[in-house]
Image: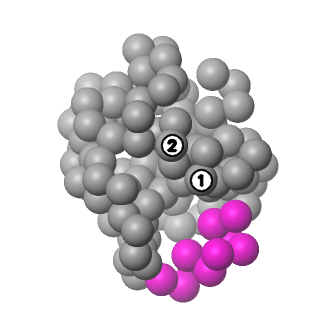
Amino acid sequence: MKEELLHFIWNYKLLKTQELVSVNGAKLKLFHQGELNKDAGPDFFNAKIEADGITLVGNVEIHVNSSDWLKHGHENDKAYNNLILHVVYKYDKAIAQNTKHNVEVLELKII
């Protein structure tokens, strides 16, 4: 699995968006996937989602594995402190920064 493929799937909403549930059990609705960022920082800007009835607008980061967060050094980059969603193919590790900032994690492998 390549991260670029996950970007493509997310960018073109090629998943069953009516059935999304975070790894914490929050029901998610995707209103707008955001704008693809080709520079440094989160992968998508200005996304709009709903998590358990609360509307959120902000950035989305995508990885093949949730542990890639640490491989990419995001825990030391404040640009990632304002995410609303971390999208991963495989949830293999809880990330403290996501927990600290109440960021929901969506695992695509189970969809």
Q: Label 2 near label 1: C-beta < 8 Å? A: yes
Q: Which residues are magenta?
A: 68-77
Which residue is identified by label 1? 4
The quadrant in which the C terminus is found is top right
Q: x%, y% of residue 39?
A: 40, 75
In this rendering, is residue 25 above or below 34?
Answer: above
> At x 41% / y 42%, what residue is drawn?
11
Quadrant position of residue 80 = bottom left
Q: x%, y% of residue 18?
A: 41, 14
Label 1, label 2: how far apart the Cα atoms are = 6 Å
> At x 44% / y 61%, what residue is drawn?
43
> At x 48% / y 83%, what residue is drawn?
77
Q: Dot 2: within a 10 Å radius of its alpha carbon, few (fewer than 14), some, or many (20 or more) residues?
A: few
In this rendering, is residue 99 above or below 106?
Answer: below
For residue 8, the mark is 2
Q: Is residue 101 visible?
A: no
